[in-house]
C-alpha cells in the first residue's frame, strides 16, 4: 500500500493539529490542565462485568476514572523493563502514570500536536520518559524497536488508519503486544477487526466497555461545562464546542446515548505481533474505514433514533436486571416466530431462564429491511443487539444456519470476556464442514427446486407464486450467508455445547452433526430424535425440557466451581 502524503491527508493533519492546540488552550483557560492530563473518557467498574486492570489505584488519585481506563486497556500486559510506545499520547498522563508504576520501563510518547508535546516535555520530566512530535500514520521509529504499543482514544482522527496499523506492526518486535482502544460506531467494529487481522496481527482478546465508560461519564464533575463555557467565551472560540462535546461525552450528548443503546461501542483489542511481514488491508475494508468518522458523527445527534429493541425481540424482551436470557436464532428463511411458543419453567429459588427469539433483518416484522449475506456483518449486528444483556448469565439457541451464527456470536463474546453459559444447537453440520452445493446463484426455477428439496415450506406456499416471490429473497440471502462461511477446524468455544440431531434428517447426517464436538472446548453433549430436518416443530416440548435441564446442569457446575475457588 502506498502511504505517500496526499493533499487531503495533509489537510486533515493540519486541521487536527489546530484542533488539538485550541483544545489545549481552552482547557488551560478553564483551569482544567490537571484534569486534562489523560484526555480520555474514563472507566468505572460495574458489578458483574469483568475488569482487566493489574493495578488498584488509591481513591484520591487525580483523574482516577481516566487513569483506570488506561490500566484497563493495558490489562495484564507485562511492562517492567519493556520499551513502550504511546501513540497519541496527548498531554502525557498515561506515560506519567506508567513511569510511576513501572520505574524500569522505557517510555516513549508520540503525538501530532506540537503544543501537547511541548507541554509533556515541561510537565513530565523523567529519565526513562521522552516525547516526540509524530504522525501516527508515519511513525518515525525503527523496525521491531518496541515491545508494547499503546493507542487509546486517538485513532478516530487518523486519515489513514490502515497505514497506522501497518506502522504499528512494523515497529513492534515479534511477540510484542498492541493495546488498542477507541469509541466506534458499532457497525465499524467488524471492519476494524478485519483490518487488524489483515495487517497480520493475532487477536488475543477483545472486549466492550461501553457500560463502564458511560458510568464514568455520568460521575464526571457537574460544574465542568460551566467552566468550559466561560473559557470558550473568553477565548472567543464557540466553534470548539462540538469538539469538546465529543471529548467529554456528556450524559446529555448524542454520543453518550449511542453508547448506552449499542449504536456506538467503546472497544478494547489486545493483539500480538507474530513473526513475518505485515499483510495489506483490502480495498473494501479500507474504504469502509474511511467513513468511520462520518458514521460516528451521525450518532452525535441526540435525536437520532436508536434501533428499537422491539425490532430484534418482537416477542420476549431480554431482562437486563436478572439476566438468564436465551437468545434464539432461526434456521435459513425462518424468523423469530419459530421460537414464539418456547417457554422455560419458572423457578422457586430465583429468576428463571427465558427464551428471547431474535428477529433478523429481512424477514417477518423486518421484511422491508435488507437481508444480511455476510457472517461478519450479521455477527456485528447481533452482538450490538444483545451486548446490553450479556453481563449476566446468558445462552444461545440455534437451528441449522442459526447454529453457525450462534457459534460466531459466542466466539466474539468469548474474546470480550462474556462467554455464554450454553450453546443449544439443532440440525446443523459442524461449522468447519463446507457446504457441498452452492445454490444462491441458481435461477428462480432451479432455486425453487432446491427449496422444495430442503423441505419445511408448506405445499400451499410452494404452489402460490406470489407467496414464493415473497419468501425467495430471504432464502437466497440466507443461502449466500451459509455458502460464504466456513470456520477453521481448530476454532472452539469454551462454553458447554448440546447438539440435537435427527436420525432421518436428509440434509444433515448424524456424523456431520457429531463433528460439532471438535469445536466444543468445554464439554459436548448429544441427543438423537426423529422428525427430519425441521424436527423442532413437532419435538418442541421435548427440546425445551432438554434445554432447561442443560441450563440447570451448567449453572450447578459453575456454582460448584465458584465454591471450590473460595
Image: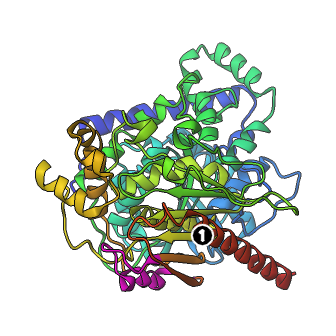
In the picture shown, does residue 506 fall above or below 72?
below
Q: Is residue 215 visible?
A: yes
In the picture shown, does residue 49 fall above or below 337?
below
Side (left or right) of 274 relative to 1: right
Between 563 and 168, the one nearer to me in the picture: 563
- Residue 251 is situated, as x and y percent measured from the top left of the image, at 70, 31
Q: Is residue 390 magenta?
A: no
| Callout 1 secondary element | helix
- Residue 453 is situated, as x and y percent measured from the top left of the image, at 23, 63
- Residue that numbered label 1 is attached to: 542
Q: Quadrant of residue 141?
A: bottom left
- Residue 508 is situated, as x and y percent measured from the top left of the image, at 34, 75
Between 331 and 466, the one nearer to me in the picture: 466
What residue lies at 76% left-to-right and 30% top-to-bottom?
31
Q: Quadrant of residue 397?
A: bottom right
Query: Start and end of the magenta stretch?
Result: 501-521
What residue lies at 46% left-to-right and 43% top-to-bottom?
156
Amino acid at each position: 500500500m502506498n502511504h505517500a502524503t496526499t493533499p487531503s491527508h495533509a489537510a486533515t493533519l493540519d486541521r487536527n493539529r489546530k484542533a488539538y492546540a485550541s483544545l489545549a488552550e481552552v482547557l488551560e483557560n478553564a483551569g482544567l490542565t490537571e484534569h486534562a492530563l489523560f484526555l480520555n473518557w474514563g472507566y468505572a467498574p460495574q458489578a458483574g462485568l469483568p475488569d482487566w486492570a493489574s493495578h488498584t489505584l488509591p481513591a484520591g488519585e487525580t483523574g482516577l476514572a481516566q487513569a483506570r481506563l488506561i490500566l484497563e486497556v493495558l490489562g495484564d500486559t507485562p511492562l517492567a523493563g519493556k520499551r513502550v510506545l504511546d501513540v497519541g499520547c496527548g498531554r502525557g498522563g498515561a506515560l506519567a502514570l506508567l513511569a510511576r508504576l513501572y520505574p524500569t520501563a522505557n517510555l516513549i510518547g508520540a503525538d501530532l500536536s506540537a503544543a501537547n508535546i511541548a507541554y509533556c516535555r515541561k510537565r513530565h520530566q523523567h529519565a526513562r520518559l521522552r516525547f516526540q512530535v509524530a504522525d501516527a500514520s508515519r511513525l518515525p521509529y525503527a523496525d521491531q524497536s518496541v515491545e508494547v504499543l499503546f493507542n487509546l482514544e486517538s485513532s478516530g482522527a487518523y486519515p489513514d488508519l490502515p497505514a497506522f496499523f501497518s506502522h504499528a506492526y512494523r515497529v513492534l518486535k515479534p511477540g510484542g503486544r498492541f493495546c488498542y482502544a477507541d469509541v466506534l460506531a458499532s457497525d465499524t467494529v467488524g471492519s476494524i477487526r478485519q483490518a487488524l487481522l489483515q495487517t497480520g496481527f493475532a487477536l488475543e482478546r477483545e472486549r466492550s466497555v461501553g457500560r463502564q465508560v458511560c458510568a464514568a461519564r455520568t460521575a464526571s464533575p457537574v460544574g465542568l461545562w460551566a467552566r468550559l463555557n466561560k473559557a470558550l467565551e473568553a477565548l472567543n472560540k464557540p466553534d470548539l464546542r462540538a469538539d469538546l462535546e465529543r471529548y467529554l461525552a456528556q450524559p446529555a450528548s448524542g454520543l453518550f446515548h449511542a453508547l448506552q443503546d449499542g449504536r456506538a461501542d467503546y472497544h478494547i483489542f489486545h493483539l500480538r505481533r507474530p513473526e513475518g511481514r505485515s499483510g495489506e488491508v483490502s480495498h473494501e475494508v479500507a474504504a469502509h474505514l474511511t467513513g468511520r468518522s462520518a458514521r460516528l458523527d451521525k450518532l452525535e445527534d441526540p435525536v437520532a433514533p436508536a434501533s428499537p429493541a422491539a425490532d430484534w425481540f418482537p416477542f420476549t424482551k431480554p431482562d437486563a436486571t436478572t439476566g438468564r436470557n436465551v437468545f434464539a436464532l432461526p434456521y435459513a428463511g425462518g424468523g423469530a416466530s419459530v421460537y414464539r411458543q418456547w417457554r422455560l419453567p419458572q423457578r422457586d429459588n430465583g429468576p428463571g431462564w427465558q427464551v428471547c427469539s431474535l428477529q433478523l433483518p429481512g424477514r417477518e416484522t423486518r421484511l422491508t429491511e435488507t437481508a444480511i449475506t455476510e457472517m461478519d456483518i450479521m455477527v456485528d449486528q447481533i452482538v450490538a443487539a444483545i451486548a446490553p444483556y450479556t453481563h449476566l448469565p446468558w445462552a444461545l439457541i440455534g437451528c441449522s444456519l442459526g447454529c453457525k451464527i450462534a457459534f460466531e456470536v459466542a466466539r466474539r463474546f468469548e474474546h470480550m470476556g462474556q462467554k455464554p453459559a450454553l450453546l443449544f444447537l439443532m440440525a446443523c453440520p459442524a461449522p468447519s464442514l463446507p457446504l457441498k452445493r452452492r445454490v444462491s446463484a441458481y435461477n428462480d426455477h432451479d432455486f425453487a427446486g432446491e427449496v422444495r428439496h430442503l423441505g419445511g415450506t408448506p405445499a400451499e406456499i410452494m404452489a402460490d407464486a406470489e407467496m414464493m416471490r415473497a419468501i425467495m429473497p430471504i432464502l437466497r440471502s440466507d443461502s449466500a450467508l451459509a455458502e460464504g462461511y466456513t470456520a477453521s477446524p481448530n476454532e472452539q468455544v469454551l462454553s458447554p455445547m448440546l447438539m440435537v440431531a435427527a436420525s432421518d434428517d436428509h440434509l444433515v447426517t448424524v456424523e456431520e452433526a457429531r463433528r460439532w464436538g471438535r469445536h466444543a472446548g468445554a464439554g459436548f453433549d448429544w441427543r438423537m430424535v426423529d422428525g427430519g430436518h425441521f424436527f423442532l416443530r413437532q419435538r418442541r416440548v421435548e427440546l425445551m425440557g432438554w434445554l432447561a435441564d442443560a441450563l440447570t446442569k451448567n449453572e450447578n457446575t459453575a456454582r460448584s466451581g465458584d465454591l471450590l475457588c473460595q
